[in-house]
Image (tube, grey):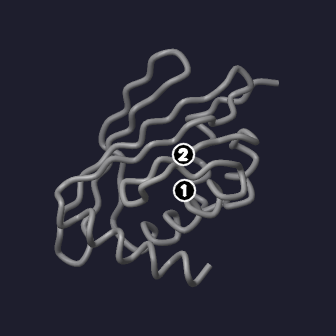
Amino acid sequence: MKMNTLERWHHILETADIEGLGDLLSDDAVFHSPVMHTPQVGRALVTQYLGAAFQLFSKYPFKYVREIVSGNEAVLEFEVEMDGLYVNGIDMITWNEKGEITDFKVMLRPLKGIHLIQEKMLVQLKAS
C-alpha cells in the first residue's frame, strides 16, 4: 500500500515519532546535510540525523511556510528563530513508488544560521 509521504512526514514532525520516521524511509535513504561534507546513507543513519534535528527544532518555533510538490518530489520551505537569529531553509524530499523517502536534502541561510545549527546539531547528536 502506498502511503501519503508528505502527510506522514508532517504527522511525524508534529508528534516527534522517531519510530514512524524509520518506517517512512527507504532502506537506502540518503540525507544531504548543510553541515556535513558527505551524504549520510542508509535508514539507520538518516533516522539518527533527522531524529536529532527533530529534537533540536522542537525546542524552537519551527514552521513550514511553503510547500511545492511535483510528482514524487517536494520542496518545503521553513522558518525558525534560534537564539534571536532568524534561519530560513528548505527540505528537498524525494520518495519512491511505495511512498518511502529515498533522498532528503536540507539547505539553510544565512551563514550565521548554518554555523549555529551545526553547533547545536553536534551537541544533539552526541546526546542521542
Name the residue tied to disc 2.
10
**43 above or below 102?**
below
Residue 76 in which image quadrant: top left
Instruction: State which quarter of the image contains the N terminus.
Output: top right
- Secondary structure beneath dot 1 equals helix
Q: Which is more toward the observer, 60 or 26?
A: 26
Report crowding for label 2: few under 14, some 14 to 19, many 20 or more residues within 10 A (C-alpha).
few
CA–CA distance between discs 1 and 2? 6 Å
Q: Which residue is drawn at 62% across and 54% down?
A: 46
**110 above or below 27?**
below
**Which amino acid type corresponds to the residue marked 2 in the rendered image?**
His
Where's residue 20, x and y in %? Answer: 72, 52
Q: Residue at x 54, y 75 (%)?
A: 125
Looking at the image, do the residues carrying marks 1 and 2 touch, with CB atoms under 8 Å apart?
yes
Report crowding for label 1: few under 14, some 14 to 19, many 20 or more residues within 10 A (C-alpha).
few
Name the residue tied to disc 1.
14
Where's residue 114, x and y in %? Answer: 27, 62
Residue 112 in which image quadrant: bottom left
**Which amino acid type corresponds to the residue marked 1 in the rendered image?**
Glu
Where's residue 18, x and y in %? Answer: 67, 61
**128 above or below 53?**
below
Q: Which is more toward the observer, 124 or 82?
A: 124
